[in-house]
Amino acid sequence: MSRTVNVGIIGSGGMGARHASNLTYMVAASEVTAIMDVDAARAEKIAARCGGARIYSDAERLIAAPEVEAVVIAAPNRFHAKLTKACIDAGKPVLCEKPLATGGAEAREVIEAEASGGRRLVQVGLMRQFDPAHVAVKRISDSGAQGNALVFRSVHINPSSDGSPSLGDVITGSLIHDIHSARWMMGDEIVRVHTSYIPFSADTPDSARYVMVQLEFAGGALGGLECNADSGYGYEIEVSITGETGVVHSSPLQSPVVRHSNASGQWVEEDWLQRFNEAYVLEAQAWVQSVLDGEAAGPSAWDGYVSMLVADACIESGLQFRPQAVKLPERPAIYR
């Protein structure tokens, strides 16, 4: 007899709504039984789509609720670490959206809480690990057909920004995905970074419109991350790995090429939810299966923690105008 995982979702904004929809309609082995949001009207709307999930106004009450077996955290970033630790304390599997925390020190608290329990309960929403395009690039590179990997590169184009985001906002809100992709796809740790950026205007020197980060890996490979925080035209992601005898890269656009009236063009996705629609479904399916199996899979809390340490170094490098080393502590046994 098949079993269903009862899921509670904290946050019913864009990401929370996407997870609620996927878990309800795209994952047969899950049921959304609880929704928490401070916006009651929004929570009620999402709950209705899920078949009448119970609504909570307090996140920790949802986590403790007996009808909730596993939790998705899609609340604002500043709540991620605290709520993830609450799930660990309750012994409930959790899928926490990125970033795991607001900084490396806070993420370390999550690592310590999970490690003290002796088993993995946390999966971090670094969903590019489930994106078919990224997986294909990694698979070809790992095959060795192009020799040893020498250079990793990713380009991250956002359509627009709310206001003038700071360097920290861009790195922890956008480039954190690219940082994880670099570590995961190269199978190596980042040991040194050098960040440069262009502000939105001379009047907002602390803002970051375009960010470039140079990477050095422990094994000697190099890398480069680029993020345009306000392109004005759409959303694109491109990733490539250069080997000793060739290069493998993904297509920045997923749409077909259309030629008409003496022109050739492609449609550009409006946002990340469109571009990574399939990745989010695959992520949800893998997470629910891991809950059923009783063993966490996918990007771990350790991945979320190390990505935050690299992000912290990237921010410090940009603010200090010099390269910054990334110092990694010993990996706890449960993440080996």
Image (tube, helix red, strand yellow):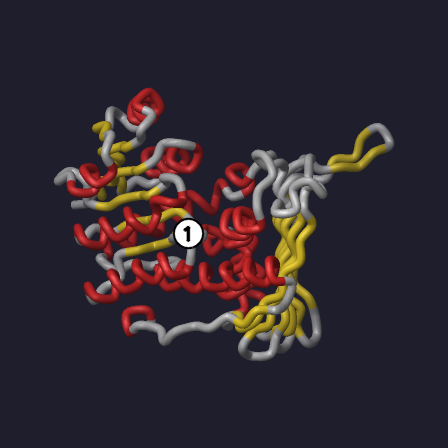
Q: Quadrant of residue 23?
A: top left
The N terminus, quarter of image? top left
User: Farthest residue in the front direction?
Assistant: 203
Residue situated in front as seen by the camera: 301 or 240: 301
Q: Residue at x 30, y 40 (%)?
A: 28
Q: Is residue 165 above or below residue 246?
A: above
Q: Name the spot of residue 107 as percent of width and height, x first.
A: 36, 58
Q: Residue at x 49, y 60 (%)?
A: 312
Q: Residue at x 69, y 50 (%)?
A: 198
Residue situated in front as seen by the camera: 167 or 59: 167
Q: Quadrant of residue 6?
A: top left
Residue underneath mark 1? 102
Q: Quadrant of residue 88?
A: bottom left
Q: Residue at x 25, y 40 (%)?
A: 7
Residue situated in front as seen by the camera: 306 or 128: 306
**Does residue 299 appear in this view?**
yes
Q: Is residue 75 above or below residue 144?
A: above
Say whether residue 251 is left or right of residue 48. right
Residue type at the position of mark 1: Thr
Q: Is residue 141 above or below residue 196?
A: below
**Does residue 250 appear in this view?**
no
